[in-house]
Amino acid sequence: MTGRTWASRPTDRGVEMVAHAAARPYWLDRDLRPEHRPRLVGETGADLLVIGGGFTGLWAAVQAAERNPSRSIVLVERDRIAEHASGRNGGFCAASLTHGLGNGLQRFPDEMPTLLRMGRETLDAIQDTLTRLGIDADVERTGELDLATTDWQFDDLAETAAAGQALGEDLVLLDTSAARERVNSPMVRGALYDPNVLIIDPAKLAFGLADAAERLGVRIFENTEVLALASGQAGDKVCARTDFGQIRADRVVVATSASRSLVRRLRLYTVPVWDYALMTEPLSDEQLASLGWTGREGLADSGPRFHYFRLTADNRMLFGGWDAPYHFGSDDDPRRARRPAEWALLGEHLLQVFPQLEGITATHTWGGVIDTCSRFCAFWDTSHGGRVVTAVGFTGLGVGASHFAAAAALDLVDGLRTERTALEMVRRKPLPFPPEPVRWAGITLTRQQMARSERRNGRRGAWLALLDKIGLGFDS
């Protein structure tokens, strides 16, 4: 069995599935969203300023408040809490800190035993914190099934399973028969099961963290964009100039994801790429039973371009991924979030995975930017005399890793020497992307070669092999 090929163009049934969907994120289109928090007007001060109201910023605020309840903390968000990547993602909260085992082994081979342990500890800490703070985020510890749709993908999963098992990971390789008992799809050739993944409602998580932060004494301001950071004389505070005021803080954690970096020299280290997703209507009991998906695991296929899909608490299916467009000049114009052809193609791909769902409709479709860096996982930077720490670059697998990133950022900004700050992963940054127009040409060629690799049974080719060798990559 060699596997089936994904459709390359939208079909009539794909268009029909998404044609009447609301073009906004399902997670944010519910009655759960809190009222607007105030905008910062005038001047205020803080011991710690956190810039960014996504997962990394929220975890930083919560952890900082729990570490030192007497510390005054301000968190500012340019728009609203979870407005961007944190409110648009699939809700896969993985233990991996390195965007998967394979990527980690390639980039941090000597540290992988430590990183794997710390990832599992992070996942446990997330669950413990949600319980302790009373945050209901529809958490299910279902694990994740990475699906092979071709023989060569199954061979790759077998190699990953062997490598992970050698490091003590509880990875389980499933052949075609065993995999189809878990997911009833003609596309499935085999699977790799990782138990260390939570499936979570991302908006409930973000809203719950923001509420918990405020209960811990954090002041949160929405619709407050930081325009610039400036350091005063030695020993002075950092001044964050906003659109209607300023904040003077002893320390600053910057967690702005795909937004233009406030630290100029970091602007070549990440690029914004676009991700698209759809959410279906709730599946009936009969439809759900036909999928054989009784474990409710998070699912992802394992080609160079991949999909991610999961069930919600009310049995809707989220289906996203596949393409990761980049636009010249790091263009993140919000108008690019509306891409009917992308949604229709995802609809066709969903029906290729589950033909038994023919006729199902999507209620929501959305798109938006995420930050990617050349090593595909988070990195940290210290600036302004050690008073400012930036944590970005998650490349789409940040729900769990953001907790670790926030902890490491707080260690760094407080000048602590910890097991986290000693890691090569934390001490070193990835290679930067080249400036335009070389950046656009290189990313475009890389995306083309990734698609070609998929058509050639995973053979990477000279260009991708060169990028692998020098440690420069592009992913979503």
Image (tube, grey):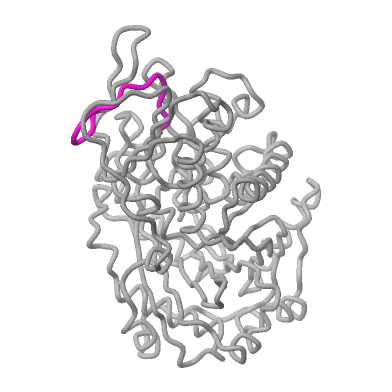
**Residue 445 visible from this viewpoint:** yes
Does residue 101 show up?
Answer: no
Locate residue 119 relative to residue 412 in the image: left or right.
Answer: right
Of residues 426 and 242, which is closer to you in this image? Answer: 242
Looking at the rendering, which quadrant does residue 220 occupy?
top left
Q: Is residue 100 above or below residue 285?
A: above
Instruction: Residue 425 in the image: state x and y as whole percent.
Output: 58, 33
Which residue corresponds to the image point at 44% horizontal and 83% vertical from the top-left? 348
Residue 119 at x, y percent in the picture:
66, 44
Q: Is residue 217 above or below residue 30?
A: above
Instruction: Choose between 368 and 434: the one closer to the eye.
Output: 368
In the picture provided, is 219 more to the left or to the right than 139? left
| Residue farthest to the top, as pictured | 234
Q: Is residue 251 magenta?
A: yes
Residue closer to the observer: 128 or 260? 128
Q: Residue at x 69, y 47 (%)?
A: 124
Q: Quadrant of the N terminus?
A: bottom right
Residue 67: image quadrant is top right
Q: Is residue 329 left or right of residue 261?
A: left
Magenta stretch containing residue 7, yes or no?
A: no
Magenta region: 241-253
Asked which quadrant contains residue 146, the reply is: bottom right
Residue 451 image offset from top left, x and y in percent = 45, 66
